Amino acid sequence: MNKSVVVMLFGIIMVFSMMQPGYSQVKSGATLENGTWHTKVGKQVQITTDVTNGQNRAQPFAYIVQIQNQDGVVYSLSWITGTLDAGQSLSPSQSWMPTAPGTYTAQIFVWASVNNPDALSPPLSMTITVL
C-alpha cells in the first residue's frame, strides 16, 4: 500500500488505500506522487478501505464510494452494506475504471446505513489524476 490514512469515530477505524486488482502493492497501476494518485484511462483501480469495529458490540454499516470530476459531476457512486461484529475488520473495495482523462476526487463514507447518513467515521477523500 503506497498511502494509508487512518481515522476513527464512533469506534469504526478506517485505513484507506488504492490498489489495482491482481497486482502487488508495489506494482499497482496507480502511483502516488505529491499526495495525488495517477492512473490511465481504461485501467481498473480498486478503492479499498480497511474498516475495523473498535466497539464492544456489533455495528451495521454502509461503505460508500463517490467519484466526482473537477466540476463536481458524480461519475460513480457505489456502496457495500453489512455488519461488523465487535473487533471485526473488513477491507471493502469498490472498483472504478476511468473512461476520460482529468482530475477526479474519490470520497469514502462509512455511515450507519445507506438510508441513515449518521457518520461512523469522518469521510476520506483522495485526488486521482487520469492520463
Image: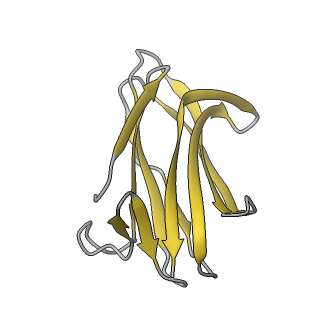
* Residue at the image point whose x is 25% and y is 70% from the top: 24
Q: Measured along the vertical axis of the image, is residue 93 above or below residue 100? A: above
Q: Name the residue nearer the viewer: 85 or 31.
A: 31
* Residue at the image point whose x is 63% and y is 50% from the top: 79
| The furthest residue to the front | 34
Asked if residue 18 lies left or right of residue 83, the reply is left
Q: Name the residue nearer the viewer: 5 or 71.
A: 71
Residue 114 shows in the view = yes
Q: Measured along the vertical axis of the image, is residue 59 above or below residue 103? A: above
Residue 59 drawn at (x, y percent): 53, 25
Asked if residue 3 lies left or right of residue 12, the reply is left
Q: Measured along the vertical axis of the image, is residue 69 above or below residue 7? A: below
* Residue at the image point whose x is 65% and y is 56% from the top: 78
Residue 52 shows in the view = no
Q: Measured along the vertical axis of the image, is residue 93 above or below residue 37? A: above
Q: Name the residue nearer the viewer: 7 or 88.
A: 7
